[in-house]
Image (cartoon, rainbow, N blue to C red):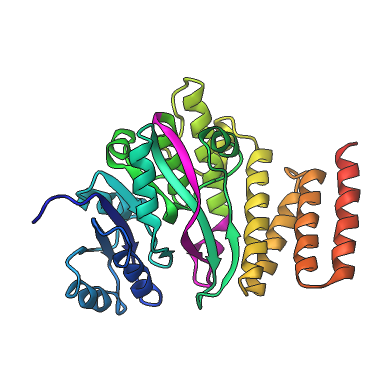
Amino acid sequence: MGPAPAVSVLMPVRNGERFLAEAVESVLAQSFTDLELVVVDDGSTDSTPRILERIASQDPRLVVRRREPGRNLSEVRNFAAGCARAPLLAPLDADDVALPDRLRLQTGFLAAHPEVGLLGGQALLIDGSGREFGKAEYPTTDQDLRVALRKGNQFVHSSTVFRRDAFRTVGGYRLNFEHAEDLDLCLRLADAQQVANLPDVVVKYRIHGDQQTFRKQEEQATFSAAARASARARAEGRPDPFDGAEIDEEYLVAHGVSREEITASVVSSAAWLGRTSDRGGYPDAAHRLFDVAYSKARSESGSPALVASVHRSLASRHAEQGHRFRAKLKAVQARLAERRSRG
């Protein structure tokens, strides 16, 4: 085995044959070549092993580790990190695509800014066929990111690079933060060092019908609320009530997170994903997600302000589709709800 590379790209996969080759090849074709790609095959039963074997025979920088299915994605991500040799770790999910200069730009920035321990970038949104249909844009500076992180995730995980020493210091991904392990890790890394996003687009983030995000949206939003509450406790010098806990909505409420905050998290997440999935060509998923958002906004723990936010999202959706009357109707409903919210 030769000297350690500068960057270890970490890719967990289970039955990812549909997009895997494109994801792997996007790493191996980087303009920055001092890398290894650690792919952990988490018990795949499709053609994933054969795809990896074929590519690994052509490029020794691809390191494949096969194992029985893990408890959850956090465990698999930690296993991948444990196999890595580089001082920098760069996640890439097996359905996303790294742009050619991603690692060159990010390693250069981190070399020039040793105070930054977590670096992301902007992302293009693509559908299952690779069609670009939007852009995910996030704040770039440490100050702006810390403010924005109080409300939601400001990093596409497949765009991030973080220092391995910091990752080990904070304890890696926490197994009990299913569906929001990436946000939880980012918040804990932000406790230790500055964070940043490049203004450059560095990754294509894929939205597709098989995505777990569609199926687990409410759980993801609840765990995201837990991750933010965990960060608040640490910032206030209190013991972290979520460390090792079995997290659900009742546990959050018992530890000071209001149902209103949880509901707001679910509504915001569902509305964003509804708009995004609709643009990506998944209208059925969008309809279900907007139904979730509207139902939660009108629930006992919702509010007229949340109802207004859903109407505004639907107004934007209809306007983009050219449905002018529907857009105007939703805009009127949003204004009426806003008036109710002001009492």
Residue 127 figure quarter: bottom right
- Which quarter of the figure is the N terminus placed in? bottom left
**Where 259 falls versus 279 (above or below)?**
above
**Where 25 falls versus 81 (above or below)?**
below
Question: Is residue 157 toward the left or the right of residue 261 in the image?
Answer: left
Q: Is residue 53 magenta?
A: no
What x and y, as percent, mark residue 207?
53, 67
What x and y, as percent, mark residue 25?
32, 71
Residue 240 figure quarter: top left
Q: Residue at x 66, y 50 (%)?
A: 268
What x and y, as percent, mark residue 64?
21, 65
Q: Residue at x 39, y 51 (%)?
A: 105
Q: How many marks?
A: 0
Residue that protrudes farthest toward the left in the picture: 1
- Which quarter of the figure is the C terminus placed in? top right
Q: Is residue 95 visible?
A: yes
- Identify the magenta region: 192-217
In-front residue for pair 69/87 = 87
In-front residue for pair 72/152 = 152
In-front residue for pair 101/267 = 101
Question: Is residue 283 toward the left or the right of residue 30 in the image?
Answer: right
In-front residue for pair 197/95 = 197
Q: Is residue 16 visible?
A: no
What x and y, as percent, mark residue 300?
76, 44
Question: Is residue 318 toward the left or the right of residue 111 in the image?
Answer: right
Q: Residue at x 40, y 57 (%)?
A: 102
